[in-house]
Amino acid sequence: MQVFKEGGHRLFQNDPECAEIVSKMLADLEKRGMDAVREYSRRFDDWCPPDYELSAAQIDSAIAAVDPGVIQDTEFCQSNVRTFAQAQLATLHSMEVETHPGIILGHKHIPVRSVGCYIPGGRYPMFGSAQMSIIPAKVAGVQNVYAFTPPVKGQGFFPATVNAMKKAGADRIFILGGVPAFAMMAFGMGVFAPVDMLCGAGNKFVAEAKRQLYGRCGIDLLAGPTEIMVIADDSADSALVACDLLGQAEHDPNSGVALICLSHDFARRCDAELQKQLTVLPTRDIAALSWRDNGRIYVAENREEAVALADDYAPEHLEIQTADPDYYFQSLRNYGSLFIGAETTVAYGDKCIGTNHILPTSRAARYTGGLWVGKFLKTVTYQRMTPAASRLIGRVTERQCEAENMLAHAITARVRVERYSHE
């Protein structure tokens, strides 16, 4: 392996200053409640309405202001997400097995009661993110979904986002952003009962708030700046590869952008094409910084090394543009979502194809996938036994407990052996 272009370290680093700021804010928000919410919302977003929750009339008014074409496209995207989530749910079955005569073990899936979904809206109004968290939660059977999105600074809500949240199935909609939004979801603040789970993407302060609130609430996953990796051999179109890399680079100056090639010639062509496209890219001010600081091009000796490099990087999004995509599909292990062939691209997954765009970053794909309907379900176990089976298990349990000197445990087994010895 050789490095044709080396950018900065793309991992989402722990930021002690950010952690301290968020910790102090959460403590203040929990202590002072809505007074603190209003203070922070006014300071950061120039937003302090009489009520952060939208009324039914406000929701209807917002939807009426959305272009009909945007509404139609949103419904198309949401239908795809819902169809895929329903298909995923269909793979999750309750199970029961008799391991010995009279010993019945099983598991069942129970949806969490309530979820707080955060729809980001900082640099871009990412209303397409609404369906990615709300729809899987509702398909899973979550009763209460509270949806939060930040305001357009000083102006209020973005109508297309309100439309997307409502159509996705949000039970209540709030215009509030950042750490205060997560504090309200986690603490309730007298507005609703604290949620059981937090989900959604956001900036580093949002990610840190989720990290600090984990345990008090469940979370979907921790994610930092977005990432894309493309594996492309000489059969790929260098212009298309460069286009896809820049498509993610525009997200954030900290976006991770990486390419694995199989030859130096192709690496040079991609780099030249990328520089050419940057000169006319409307969002080049952001994308150029991301490519300069975080862009990487690797040249692998063969496809086996390409797979090893990709698995070590463990990207959020991974595109395969090669002559033999099936080899990579069968061999790769670590990625958030895989885009196979030049016909598909990360933007399809981000917006409307139906898979989820809330995905692991910073090498978290080594141990978790992205958000899906199963994240909102608790898989719980149960057991039931006949008296004869209780005697059988009780004798072994008693001996095991005594060997561990856990005598009270042993007694609970012994009394059952004695109680059911005549049955």
Image: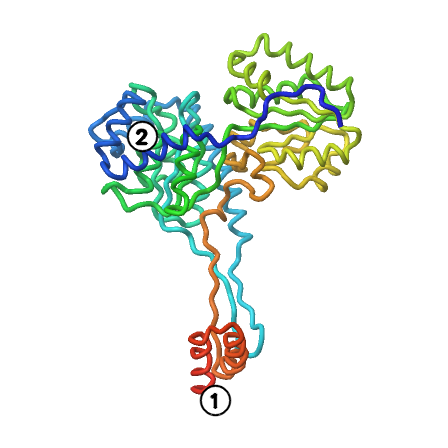
- Name the kind of residue labelled 2 in the image: Leu
Residue 339 placement (x, y as % from top left):
63, 33
Residue at image mark 1: 421
Q: Residue furthest top?
A: 279
Left or right: 43 with respect to 109? left
Residue 200 placement (x, y as % from top left):
43, 36
Residue drawn at (54%, 24%), measured in percent from left and top?
Answer: 255
Q: Quadrant of the N terminus?
A: top right
The Cα–Cα distance between marks 1 and 2, rounded to whole angstroms, is 63 Å
Residue at image mark 2: 176
Q: Quadrant of residue 353?
A: top right
> Which of the colour schemes (rainbow, by chain, secondary structure, one colour) is used?
rainbow
Residue 173 placement (x, y as % from top left):
31, 35
- Name the kind of residue labelled 1 in the image: Ser
Residue 77 placement (x, y as % from top left):
49, 32
* Marked residue nearer the N-terminal end (1 or 2): 2
Left or right: 64 with respect to 389? left
